[in-house]
Amino acid sequence: MTEYAPRDGQAGVDAAALAVGFSTALRRAGLPSSPDRAAWLAQALRIVPPAAREPLYWTCRVALVSSHEQLPVFDAVFSAAFDGMLDPADTRGDASSPPTIGAEERTRAAPNERPLAHADGRVPASRAPVAAPGLANDDESNAPGFEAILAMASPDEYLHEKSFAELTPEEAAHVRQLVRRIVLATPERRSRRTRQWAHSGAKLDLRRTIRAARRAGGDASSLVYARRRQRPRRLVFLCDVSGSMEPYTQVFLSLLQGAVAGAQAEAFVFSTRLTRLTRQLSNRNTDKALALGAAAAPDWAGGTRLAESLRRFIDGYGRRGLARGAVIVVLSDGWAQDAPELVDAQMARLRRLACRIVWVNPRKAGTDYQPLAGGMAAALPYCDAFISGHNYAALTEAATAIRAERSRPARKQG
C-alpha cells in the first residue's frame, strides 16, 4: 500500500484540523456536515491515520456520508481536496473503490454564475461545484490539497492551546472575544419555594388545598400537590489582579464579563484590597467595562493580600448570603503576602459556606509546578477542583468543573 510521506519539515497529520477542514469543505459544497460528525471523523483518524488514500477515503465516507445520494458530491470534494497528495494505485482493479484521484471531471461555476439552490438555501448535489470551496485553481496555487484543507480549519483552533502570556495584542483581543462566549452554568439546587405539581412524585400542599376549599365554599373538591423548585446555584468569581497575574488579567476579566452577562454571576477582584465589579462588568461595551473595572480597583497590579481579601468577602458579602450554597471560582496564582495560617483560616470559613470551590491557577501549567507557595498550599485542601487557566482550553475545563455536581473533599485534620 502506498503511504503518504510528509515532506521535509512537515509535522504529522493533525486529525482535528483535517476533520474540521474537510467537513467545512463538504458543507460549503452543499453537503450537510454537523460538528458531531466532524468530531467522529477526528476520533476515527486517530485510530486509522491517513497514510494512504483508501483508508482515508473510507474513514471520511463512513463518518460524514449518511445517504447514497450524497456520494457524488463527497467523491468530488474528496478528489479535489486530496489530488496529488495520495497515490491511489492500491485501489486499481477494485470495482467498489472510489474514483481515482484526478480521473473525475472537474467543473467550476462561471465567475458570474451561481449554482441553483433550493428554497431553504441548500445547493443540489447535481449542481454543486466539485472543486474544493475557497481554493484557488491549479494555475494560481501549487499548494498541495492537504495544506489547503488545513487552511480551511477554524482560525481559532491554534489559539486554544496557546498560553495567554504568549499572545500578541491582536491574538489577545481575539481570545478575549472567544472567552466571553464560554457558556458557564452551575448545578441546580432545591429552592425553598414550591410550585404546583402533578400527583406523581409530589407532596400534598395543605395550604393550597385549604385555600382552594375556601374558594369552593369549604368543600375540598380536589387535592393540590406541590414540589420544591429547582434553581441554579449562584456563581461568584474572585479574580486576582496583582502584579504576578498581569499576563492573564485581561483575559480573565473578559471571562468575568461574560459570566456576569450570561450567568448572572457576581464578580470581585482583589490585590491589596477587595473590589466588587459586578455593576461595572455588566456594561455590554467590552472596552468600557474593562476601563470601568480598572478605575474602580485602585490597587490594580499591586501586591496580593489573599487572606485579607477572603476575609473581607466573607464578612461583607459571603455571610449575608452571597456565598451560601454558591459555586466560588478563585482565579489566582496563590502568591500571597499573608501568612499561610491566615489563608488556611479564611479558606476554612469559605468552605463552610460554599457548595464548591474551584481554583484556577495559570502557574499549574508548568511541567515542574508544585503547589508549594504558602497561600496556594494552604488553600488547596479546601478546593473541589484545581485547574490551570493558562489558555482557552484550560478555561473550558474550568467551565466543566463549575457545572459539576456537589462533592465535598475530606475534612482537613488537625
Image (cartoon, rainbow, N blue to C red):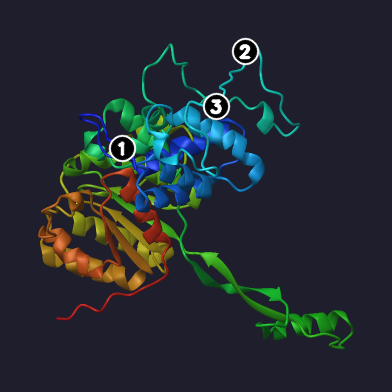
Residue 79 location (% of width, % of height): 49, 31
Q: Amino acid at mark 2?
A: Ala
Residue occupying image coordinates x 18% and y 55%: 334
Q: Residue furthest right?
A: 217
Tell which tag, 2 or 3, sits nearer the viewer: 3
Cα–Cα gap, marks 2 and 1: 47 Å
Q: CA distance from mark 2 to mark 3?
A: 19 Å
Residue at image position (25%, 32%) is 10
Q: Give the residue number, with chain letter if any, for mark 2.
A: 110
Q: In the depicted view, which residue is nearer to us: 89 or 79?
A: 89
Residue drawn at x 26%, y 28% as measured from the top left? 168
What residue would you read off at disc 1? 250
Kind of element beneath mark 2? loop
Q: Secondary structure at mark 1?
A: helix
Could you say which is closer to the camera, residue 275 or residue 394?
394
Q: Residues within 10 Å of mark 1 (few under 14, many from 20)?
A: some
Amino acid under label 3? Glu
Residue highlighted by disc 3: 104
What separation in Å lies between label 1 and label 3 (alpha carbons)?
52 Å
The answer to whether residue 342 is above or below residue 237 is: below
- Inspect the image, locate mark 1, and give the three-letter code of the amino acid beneath it: Gln
Q: Residue 378's x, y, as percent?
A: 16, 65
